[in-house]
Image: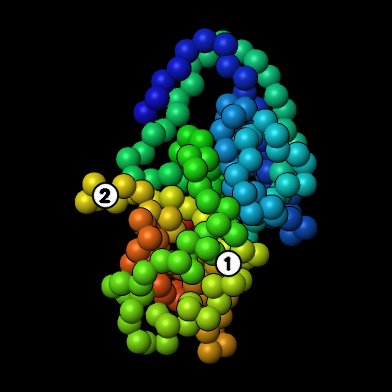
Amino acid sequence: MIVGDGQKHLVSIIVDLDGDAGSATGLIEATDGHPFWMEDQGRWLAAGKLKPGNQLHAVSGNPVTVVSVTPRTESRTAYNLSIDGIHAYYVLANTTAVLVHNTGPCGIPTAAEAAELVKKATPTGSALKAEPWHRAGSFVVDDISKKGTVFKIGSKDGRGDATLIQMPGELNGKPGRYEWIVRDGIMSHLMFIRGGTINGIAIKP
């Protein structure tokens, strides 16, 4: 955890949690530079640049809509998580978890760049398996540039970060997500996750 004292530029973000179904809202407070995942734009954006109407990614898979963003400057202690091996995590807005970034965008490729990484990577491990849920992702790589979401994930073997790409889709009429993991030109994971959502966590639905 990184702790900082002094004058901080903060924002209070109100989000709509249930759309037209009700009037539930949630509050998120963050420093103005903290990145949030923009569901409607497919990119990270600093909290201070959020606008009403922007859609943020929620753990449920259903985006939440920004209602208001109120900036302020005050002297206080700010806590910024630095989680080993994890570059994105969820914070609570009332009872809804919203995806934010560990610190800064840290060189995350664009969706188009990620598509090229996958195309050029040498497959190994599950990326070579013959089952349909492993092979099918090979035929939708061109869609990554338009529909893919890119994350950085750490490793337990000390070999550095890998790029995780997740993309909604379907296989044999069943909805879910495709995902690829690439590191140093090697694609070690290629799989369709039935019922999977875009969550930045490999294999877990």
Q: Is residue 3 left or right of residue 94?
A: left
Viewer can see residue 58: no
Q: Residue furthest bottom?
A: 172
User: In what quadrant of the picture does the N terminus appear?
Assistant: top left
Residue occupied by mark 1: 144
Looking at this view, is 9 or 15 the one in front? 9
Residue sitting at x 62%, y 27%: 32
Looking at this view, is 46 or 190 the one in front? 190
Q: Is residue 5 left or right of residue 42?
A: left
Q: Which percent across, then down, holds residue 55?
A: 69, 50
Q: Amino acid at mark 1?
A: Ile
Q: Amino acid at mark 2?
A: Arg
Residue sitting at x 41%, y 20%: 3
Residue sitting at x 53%, y 51%: 109
Residue 10 to residue 197: above or below: above
Q: Which percent across, then down, holds residue 151?
A: 48, 53
Residue 8 to residue 91: above or below: above
User: In what quadrant of the picture does the C terminus appear?
Assistant: bottom left
Q: Secondary structure at mark 1?
A: helix
